[in-house]
């Protein structure tokens, strides 16, 4: 008597969209595609780069030659550039805000939502493309800085670390810009909302002056301001001094400016990324 052995039916694996092994490569691929799309838009409309490149050049020349003469001349220009770097990458968060708000209100995000792509890709692609814009802006400012007398006096490794700290801060601020853009009811509101909080943040800092000259409460704000930390980290790693008339900053943030700048950027990312993804799910489900 023979017995037939029936094969057990094969168990289907998890679908591709739920397979953990495929989620990360897919998110990376989709983010790269969205970033490429955003960069193509900038190439086709180069006027979009005006804010990211022309504005920092204006700040360099205005502060270096108009205010710099009364604040220390060439020594002030050495002090200034790291502050301009920090301020510019913070201001470029508005670039992310407006771009994402524009995509949202033109229906482009709705169209992306219908595609089989990672939910993370829309925001990651936008922030990565804007990181490229920040790299371009930094390159322009470095060339401008050398034209006005600024120099990198430290070693190559320290200079690379300085630019890495600045770009990490730029990436973190882009996620804040993404959250602001997703929360804005219109592109016009996004344009204002992207800058209204950045001006006091950048000027109540040690980006352009010694924070020790500010009155009591503002001095404390400036000491712990992330822009102050990024600017101070840049000055330390570039080995740029300050004019003799400037009172040196004291306290833990000043003594550990590089570590504090990195902690600020990581902390901003830890808060802004989940909130931006949550807001994206909310607006994309409408």
Image (cartoon, rainbow, N blue to C red):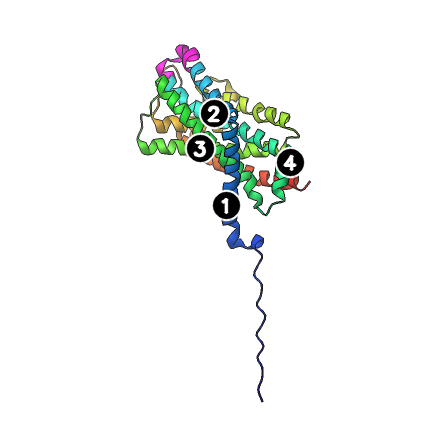
Q: Which mark is residue 88?
A: 2
The answer to whether 223 appears left or right of 196 in the picture is left
Q: Earlier in the sequence, mark 1 or mark 4?
A: 1
Residue 74 picture quarter: top left
Q: CA distance from mark 3 to mark 4?
A: 30 Å
Residue identifier under label 1? 29
**Residue 107 bears which disc, if any?**
4
- Residue 208 in view in this figure: no
Q: Which residues are magenta?
A: 64-76
Residue hosting label 3: 167
Cα separation, mark 1 vs mark 3, equals 22 Å
Residue 144 appears at what percent x and percent y? 39, 20
Residue drawn at x 64%, y 32% is 105
Per the image, label 2 sits on a secondary structure element best described as helix
User: For the point 54% across and 31% down, which residue is it?
Assistant: 96
Comparing 179 with 220, the one in front is 179
| The one of 46 and 259 positioned closer to us in this rendering | 46
Cβ atoms at labels 3 and 2 below 8 Å apart: no
Farthest residue to the right: give it.
286
In percent of width and height, residue 165 lies at 42, 33
């Amino acid at each position: 008597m023979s017995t037939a052995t029936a094969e057990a039916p094969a168990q289907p694996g998890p679908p591709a969209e739920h397979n953990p092994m495929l989620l990360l490569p897919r998110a990376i691929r989709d983010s790269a595609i969205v970033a490429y799309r955003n960069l193509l838009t900038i190439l086709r409309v180069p006027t979009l780069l005006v804010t990211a490149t022309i504005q920092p050049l204006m700040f360099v020349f205005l502060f270096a030659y108009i205010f710099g003469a009364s604040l220390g001349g060439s020594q002030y220009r050495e002090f200034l550039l790291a502050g301009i770097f920090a301020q510019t990458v913070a201001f470029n968060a508005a670039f992310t805000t407006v771009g994402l708000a524009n995509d949202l209100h033109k229906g482009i995000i709705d169209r992306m939502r219908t595609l089989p792509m990672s939910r993370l890709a829309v925001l990651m692609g936008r922030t990565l493309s804007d990181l490229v814009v920040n790299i371009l802006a930094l390159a322009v400012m470095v060339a401008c800085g050398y034209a006005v007398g600024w120099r990198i006096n430290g070693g190559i490794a320290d200079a690379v670390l300085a630019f890495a700290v600045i770009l990490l801060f730029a990436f973190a601020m882009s996620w804040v810009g993404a959250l602001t853009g997703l929360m804005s009811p219109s592109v016009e509101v996004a344009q204002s909302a992207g800058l209204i909080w950045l001006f006091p943040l950048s000027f109540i800092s040690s980006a352009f002056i010694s924070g020790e000259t500010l009155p009591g409460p503002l001095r404390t704000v400036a000491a712990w301001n992330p822009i102050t930390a990024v600017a101070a980290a840049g000055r330390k790693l570039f080995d740029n001094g300050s004019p003799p008339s400037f009172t040196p900053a004291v306290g833990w943030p000043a003594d550990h400016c590089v570590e504090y700048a990195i902690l600020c950027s990581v902390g901003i990312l830890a808060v802004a990324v989940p909130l931006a993804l949550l807001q994206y799910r909310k607006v994309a489900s409408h």
